[in-house]
């Protein structure tokens, strides 16, 4: 089934100016919440396409947070330098930071965030910082949908994880990030 989901034009998921609002995830993907997945990136997979699922769900959650504009967004980046080298990602987080969201980024401190990227920075080097891919949105009120993606790197560019819209599970992931990062 993952192969069928990935036979899309990856340009749909560009996140440059105007792209985040237009990159809507298919319900074929978004309705698989609470399903445990295992993905591989290059070289474990012949192509980087499986990893697109992580990017797709991340953008879905970020877009949802941008649409609502208030609450808390937390994201782990492994290395913070990804915000420096991935222009589309940096643009997404600049736009998120320009809202009333409280935006928190986590990662190994290998890059200095620019002053115009108004986020709360959390750095460290324990396993959670180095091996997690997490994007969490907790809205300011109970009405909008909560969302969290949590995946762990289990080998070189190999991932196991899930995503959820369950408010209690999202709050638990949020608590873990607050307590352990």
Image (cartoon, rainbow, N blue to C red):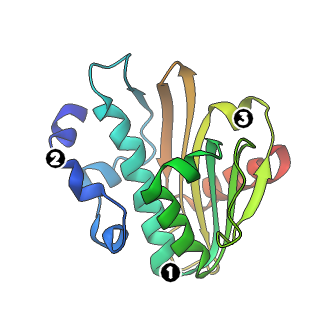
| Res. 8 mark | 2
Q: Position of residue 100 (x, y in %)?
A: 63, 83
| Res. 68 mark | 1
Q: Which image quarter holds the N terminus?
A: top left
Q: Is residue 86 above or below residue 152?
A: below
| CA separation in Å, label 2 and label 3 | 32 Å
| CA separation in Å, label 2 and label 1 | 27 Å
> In the rendered view, does 40 fall on the left or right side of 26?
right
The residue located at (80%, 54%) in the rendering is: 178
The residue located at (59%, 57%) in the rendering is: 136
The residue located at (55%, 81%) in the rendering is: 69
Which element carries disc 3, helix, strand or loop? Answer: helix
Q: Is residue 133 visible?
A: yes
> In the rendered view, does 73 fall on the left or right side of 23?
right
Circle 3 packing at 10 Å, graded few (<14), some (14-19), many (20+), is many
Pointer 3 residue: 128
- Earlier along the polypeptide chain: callout 2 or callout 1? 2
Q: Is residue 103 above or below residue 108?
A: below
Q: Position of residue 17 (x, y in %)?
A: 36, 72
């Amino acid at each position: 089934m993952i192969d069928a989901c990935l036979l899309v034009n990856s340009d749909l998921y560009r996140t440059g100016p105007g792209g985040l609002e237009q990159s809507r995830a298919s319900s074929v993907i978004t309705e698989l919440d609470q399903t445990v997945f295992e993905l591989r990136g290059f070289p474990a997979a012949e192509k980087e396409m499986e990893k697109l699922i992580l990017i797709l769900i991340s953008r879905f959650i970020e877009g949802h947070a941008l649409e609502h504009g208030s609450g808390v967004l937390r994201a782990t980046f492994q290395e913070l330098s990804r915000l420096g080298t991935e222009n589309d990602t940096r643009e997404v987080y600049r736009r998120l930071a320009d809202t009333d969201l409280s935006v928190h980024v986590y990662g190994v401190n290998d890059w200095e965030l620019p002053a115009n990227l108004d986020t709360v920075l959390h750095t460290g080097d324990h396993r959670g910082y180095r091996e997690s891919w997490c994007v969490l949105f907790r809205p300011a009120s109970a009405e909008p949908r909560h969302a969290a993606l949590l995946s762990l790197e289990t080998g070189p560019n190999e991932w196991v994880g899930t995503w959820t819209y369950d408010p209690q599970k999202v709050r638990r992931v949020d608590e873990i990030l607050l307590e352990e990062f």
